[in-house]
Image (cartoon, rainbow, N blue to C red):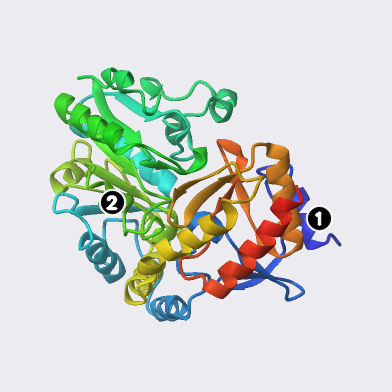
Amino acid sequence: MLSPRQFFLQHLAQTSDLPLALEVSSASGSCIYDRDGNAYLDMISGIGVANIGHSHPRVISAITDQISKYMHVMVYGEYIQSPQNEYAEAILQLLPAHLNSVYFTNSGTEATEGIMKLIKRVSGRSKIIGFQNAYHGSTQGALSVSGNYQLQDAFMPLLPDTYIIQPEDFNELSRIDYNTAGVFVEPLAAESGCRILSKDFLLALRARCTEVGAYLIFDECQTAFGRTGSMFYFDQLQITPDILMLGKAIGGGLPLGAFITDKKLMDQLSHDPVLGHITTFGGNPVSCTAGKAALSVLLEDQLISKVAEKENYIREQLSPLHNVLGIYGKGLLLAVELGSFEKVQSLIRKCYTRHILLDWFLFNNTSFRLAPPLSISMDELSTSIEIIKQEIDQL
């Protein structure tokens, strides 16, 4: 009989040739536990999902209550389901008035796909633009506007009339023209190593999209729900998109994504053709219940108010180290630059042996990711950072 590790490697599709292969038995709070009961501090939050930590009791209670009532009953958009209504209402209360209609999906990637269809439908245009080293998902459509040729090359040809432009190059904005349906942008480009686009550039991007009638889409799958120190990162920028894209933490640990825009735009997916965009499991009532419960915890426990303090602690502790070349990002979405892939991989492996979970970035393999749960205690954070400091000094 194969061991769990052997079965995992032989019969489950692999996404890399270097999986950590941690055999998970449970997860709670800031920790993931292996089959022997060892606790690993999760300093990446399951890649931005576990904002309030793992298996929060209020989320579990809400899920259990919803499961006792019903789970899947019909494809999205046909039946009135209170978990969808109530969660959408809770999210919309946090947003500007023109972002007033929610389309729930299974993931952030699927939200990208829905947005691409929506902006073509409402604009009558086909040209879609993304930015170099931005990431919006791995399906063919999403990959077409994710600006990294290493990820794209093996799957060519991707969608026609999709273009990648350079961030912070104001001259590139002229490529956004009257044939452009929309522009996807991460104001904080997580997978490029948490590089923050300047406010001046984003203002110019907003102005150019408005000028030519292109829709501006903010991808906040990794930044939303408090990770940067505000509910949405665009709150800090005071620049609002036409369409907002959400994923990861929105589901409270269960699969969920969303795109949000004005109802007069969203309604155009419902006719000519009817069922212009459909999903079987998007907006699953259990996922919506989990997401709403997690959002309530985030707000009621005032977790966002503690993000800046934790960010400052991390920067104060790691910035002076001679092997740290820079720390990029905002809040608890940080990239620590070490200068080489070998150093990053060595650090990840060494910290893993000391029960600290780290990771790198799709488009920046010389930095490691620090994105712990917003709920992480200062004791847990200091324990993790002390171990990370010790291992960085040994690189």
Residue 41 numbered tag: none
Q: Quadrant of residue 2?
A: bottom right
Residue 139 is situated, as x and y percent measured from the top left of the image, at 48, 37
Residue 380 is situated, as x and y percent measured from the top left of the image, at 58, 72
Q: Residues within 10 Å of mark 1 (few under 14, many from 20)?
A: few
Task: Residue at 25%, 69% (x, y): give it.
Answer: 86
Q: Is disc 2 placed on a helix, strand or loop? A: helix
Q: Quadrant of residue 209?
A: top left
Q: Which residue is mark 2?
A: 236
| 54 shown above or below 76 | below
Residue 9 is situated, as x and y percent measured from the top left of the image, at 76, 50
Residue 6 numbered tag: 1
| 393 shown above or below 226 | above
Gap in Å between the C-alphas at discs 1 and 2?
Answer: 47 Å
Judge depth for marks 1 and 2 and give the one in front.
2
Task: Residue at 16%, 28% (x, y): give it.
Answer: 213
Q: Residues within 10 Å of mark 2 (few under 14, many from 20)?
A: few
Q: Earlier in the sequence, mark 1 or mark 2?
A: 1
Residue type beneath disc 1: Gln
| 3 shown above or below 204 | below
Q: Is disc 1 placed on a helix, strand or loop? A: helix
Q: Using residue 256 as the reference point, say whether residue 21 is left or right of it.
A: right
